[in-house]
């Protein structure tokens, strides 16, 4: 069903009110931001590139170049043709024009124009599948289109290791660049396997970005300076690998002008007024489509059953599917069935699901490192339970009371190690280890540890 992306956020009260002409020969949009905006709108309307080509009169190649950022600057007429072809509402059409730099001819002068705003966002992954509903929800909330919270905007995306949280927040953030002209800041809270950044370190990192590399004050003085800077600007802050609410709180100013988008390794229930999205594994058909996008129909069309088997062995997780696709592409001489049979062996599966610096095992390990030793040991023992189990099964397996087992399964669920599978008729809640977590717990433990 078609999703209305709504109107642009209006200029905030802190802008200088004297309007300044904007030359049509020098639009202020960014080609990459336009490409992501166009592809997002097209996917939300349910159109393929071929259908958009037929409706707009533009070639499929031209549309592909626009979405990939290969066309340096789309003309205003091109944007209008695309908006008409997708039957966009007024606010959506304005968003498309603004992303290309064809906004209103006069606008307020923003404080950011005293200096060049920073854009630190990672590139968006093209062809993201199965996440359109989540992307639409993030966009609507952070751009203020859902009529929601005026006291600052926050969206939190969680999911199991390899669920594609970073790809989703990067895609959403790139498509929102026009809404936050004073900068887009990206912070990885655990980018090297060391201890996560503390709240104080997060504050200093933000101050350096907003001040062009100048060091900021520490302690409460730094926190106050950051609040003042964010209150006066329209800044989007994207945080990856968050592990606690305390890491995010310094970024929350209560100002409607700035927004925070978080990819978290655990559920962050204590954050106020957050839009939350839990990423589940992809639907089987979307998982197969993700592989097809990487490998091409020429390689995949003749072996549909092997494709289904590969997707299932990947647990329908985007990271595993991406790695498997690259792994297969690097072996053009191999049949897909040969590779599918190789992945059936659980003991070797994690060894196959790595290429270059990408690894499913490393992704899971980053989560497991944050568990207490007793929780790691419990996870290893629960991995021996095939299929679903309930609190009573966990208590018996771990040799603890049902109350203690209930607390443990809750914590492991919040930590994205377990997923709930509902209740049997009138029965207790059932749990299951995520596929990649179970493989890691069974085949990566050495001497009872991780």
Image (cartoon, rainbow, N blue to C red):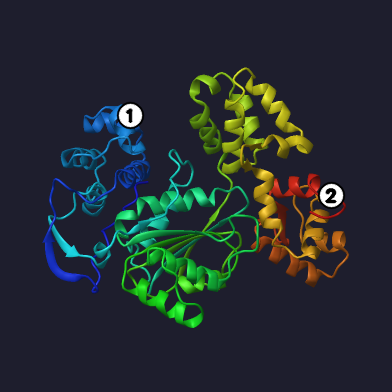
Q: Is residue 126 above or below residue 298?
A: below
Callout in the foreground (1, 2): 2
Residue 396 can be seen, yes or no? yes
Q: Which mark is residue 302?
A: none
Q: Residue at x 43, y 45 (%)?
A: 124
Q: Position of residue 412 (x, y in %)?
A: 70, 62
- Tell me the residue that label 2 is attached to: 446
Disc 1 and disc 2 in contact, CB within 8 angstroms? no
User: Which of these two is toward me, 145 or 58?
Assistant: 58
Q: Position of residue 109 (x, y in %)?
A: 19, 65
Q: Which residue is drawn at 33% across and 45% down?
A: 41
Residue 424 can be seen, yes or no? no
Sequence-first disc among 1 and 2 = 1
> Which structural element holds mark 2?
loop
- Tell me the residue that label 1 is attached to: 50
Quadrant the C terminus occupies? bottom right
């Amino acid at each position: 069903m078609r999703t209305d992306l709504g109107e642009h956020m209006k200029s905030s009260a802190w802008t200088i009110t004297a309007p300044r002409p904007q030359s049509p020969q020098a639009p202020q949009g960014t080609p990459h931001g336009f490409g992501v905006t166009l592809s997002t709108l097209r996917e939300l309307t349910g159109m393929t590139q071929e259908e958009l080509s037929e409706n707009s009169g533009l070639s499929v190649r031209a549309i592909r170049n626009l979405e990939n950022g290969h066309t340096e600057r789309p003309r205003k007429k091109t944007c209008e043709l695309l908006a008409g072809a997708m039957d966009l509402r007024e606010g959506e059409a304005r968003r498309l024009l603004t992303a290309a730099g064809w906004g209103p001819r006069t606008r307020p002068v923003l404080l950011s124009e005293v200096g060049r705003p920073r854009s630190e966002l990672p590139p968006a992954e093209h062809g993201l599948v199965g996440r359109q509903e989540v992307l639409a929800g993030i966009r609507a909330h952070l751009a203020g289109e859902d009529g929601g919270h005026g006291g600052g905007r926050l969206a939190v995306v969680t999911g199991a290791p390899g669920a594609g949280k970073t790809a989703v927040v990067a895609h959403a953030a790139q498509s929102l660049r026009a809404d936050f002209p004073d900068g887009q800041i990206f912070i990885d809270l655990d980018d090297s396997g060391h201890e996560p950044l503390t709240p104080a370190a997060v504050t200093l990192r933000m101050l350096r970005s907003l001040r062009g590399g100048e060091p900021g004050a520490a302690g409460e003085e730094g926190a106050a300076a950051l609040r003042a800077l964010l209150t006066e600007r329209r800044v989007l802050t994207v945080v990856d690998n968050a592990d606690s609410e305390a890491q995010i709180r310094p970024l929350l100013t209560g100002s409607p002008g700035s927004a925070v988008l978080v990819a978290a390794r655990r559920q962050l229930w204590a954050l106020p007024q957050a839009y939350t999205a839990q990423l589940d594994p992809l639907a089987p058909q979307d998982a197969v489509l993700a592989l097809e996008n990487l490998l091409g129909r020429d390689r995949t069309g003749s072996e549909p059953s092997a494709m289904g088997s590969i997707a299932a062995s990947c647990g329908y997780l985007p990271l595993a599917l991406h790695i498997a696709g690259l792994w297969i592409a690097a072996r053009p001489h191999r049949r897909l069935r040969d590779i599918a049979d190789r992945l059936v062996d659980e003991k070797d599966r994690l060894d196959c699901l790595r290429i270059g610096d990408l690894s499913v095992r490393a992704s899971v390990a980053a989560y497991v490192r944050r568990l207490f030793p007793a929780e790691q040991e419990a996870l290893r023992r629960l991995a021996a339970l095939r299929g679903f189990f309930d609190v009573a099964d966990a208590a018996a397996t771990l040799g603890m009371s049902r109350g203690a087992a209930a607390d443990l399964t809750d914590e492991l669920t919040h930590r994205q190690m377990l997923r709930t599978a509902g209740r049997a008729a009138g029965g207790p809640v059932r749990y299951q280890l995520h596929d990649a977590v179970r493989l890691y717990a069974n085949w990566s433990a050495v001497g009872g540890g991780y």
